[in-house]
Amino acid sequence: MSLMSHKTIRIQISTLVACLWLATSSLQGKIVFHSDRGGNWDIYTMNSDGSNQKKLTKSHATDASANWSPNGQQIAFDRRLNDKYYVTVMDADGSNERRLTRGGSPDWSPDGSLVVFNSNMNRDKEHRLNIFVMHPDGTNIKQLTKFSFVSRPKWSPDGKRIAFEGFVENTREVYIMNADGTNVWRVSEPQPRTGMFLGGWSPDSKQLLYAESIEAKADKATLVIATLDPFGRNLVRKRERINIPGMPIYGQSWGADGKSILFASKPAFHRHIYRLRLTDGKIIQLTDGLGNDSGAKEWNPRLSVASQLGGLPLFWGGIKSHALAP
């Protein structure tokens, strides 16, 4: 599928069976996400094809915004407890859970040596939300920004920059800065009554994904892929927009292969996780059932999800393929 500006996607639904593919696939990717299917928001993992879904956290708090460590051995997430947020880390199997500091939306530096997060940290009288970094054990906390409100930092895979959301004159926009907090510039284009919600970096650090959401409503959201200047200048070379009618957009992120986008949507009663394959325009449903799922982040050491799928989108024991016609 060629991505066109404001391209509208028509969805057709078909169902197939692919048990043999499931039995023989060597797909090794993992997705972490949060869900309230158990009556409380907890962290879950599953394979890249949606199979083998496992619940990791079992607290009475609200757990969300999970991200893989670069080696896939740890997961950082935020825990809301008594109206306070805490950056929490656990091993990839849910064991060895430990609270690091006040804050949320943690993300790892690509070498695993630092964790970036947002927090007010009670460090000023106005309790502003800003961006900090720390060691993975919670030590050596340093503040990177000093704005009125910035959040959801995402470290670029090349380690050079951090993207984030910031409020200017009550409008949510997407920004980029150097990893040390310098050279801040805006990536998104301001639009009336429209908020910008950051998705994250492409695996090659050349593109940034975010959503333009009119009145901050998921059913009025358009995905945007911003291609950045390859010479490191503060420029956006082009913006490609993808509109998916009938599918509200939540919690978008890049697939580990760089050729797909993960997002949550609620076309009916519950919110589920989908994969949009940019190569052929297919939308693949990964989760189903009661409860709401969102915040999918994928880790795959082989970075070859699309090629291994071989054109067969898997939905647990069968397939739900949503073909997108131009």
Image (cartoon, helix red, strand yellow):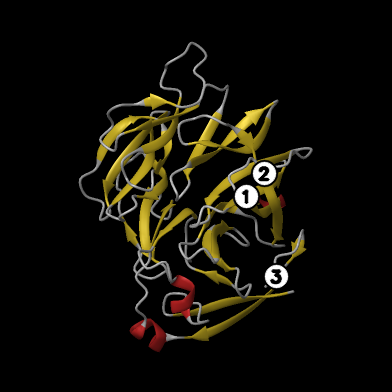
Q: Earlier in the sequence, mark 3 or mark 2?
A: 3
Q: Secondary structure at mark 3?
A: loop
Q: Position of residue 209 (x, y in %)?
A: 59, 52
Residue 41 showing in the rendered view? no
What residue does disc 1 label?
228
Label 1 or label 2, whichever comes before in sequence order: 1
- Could you classify mark 3 by the number of other residues whose Cα lies within 10 Å: few (under 14), some (14-19), or many (20 or more)? few
Which x, y percent locates residue 5?
Answer: 76, 59
Q: Is residue 299 left or right of residue 275?
A: left
Label placed on residue 235: 2
User: Do the numbered discs 1 and 2 sit on residues whose CB atoms are within 8 Å?
Assistant: yes
At a point 42% along the width and 35% down the height, the residue shown is 117
Q: Which mark is residue 164?
A: none
Residue 147 visible to an observer of this rendering: yes
Q: Quadrant of the N terminus?
A: bottom right
Q: CA distance from mark 3 to mark 1?
A: 18 Å
Q: Which SS class for mark 1?
A: strand
Reading the image, the residue beneath label 3 is 2
Q: Residue furthest left?
A: 96
Secondary structure beneath label 2: loop
Residue 194: horizontal and vertical position, in percent? 73, 41
Residue at the bottom extreme? 20
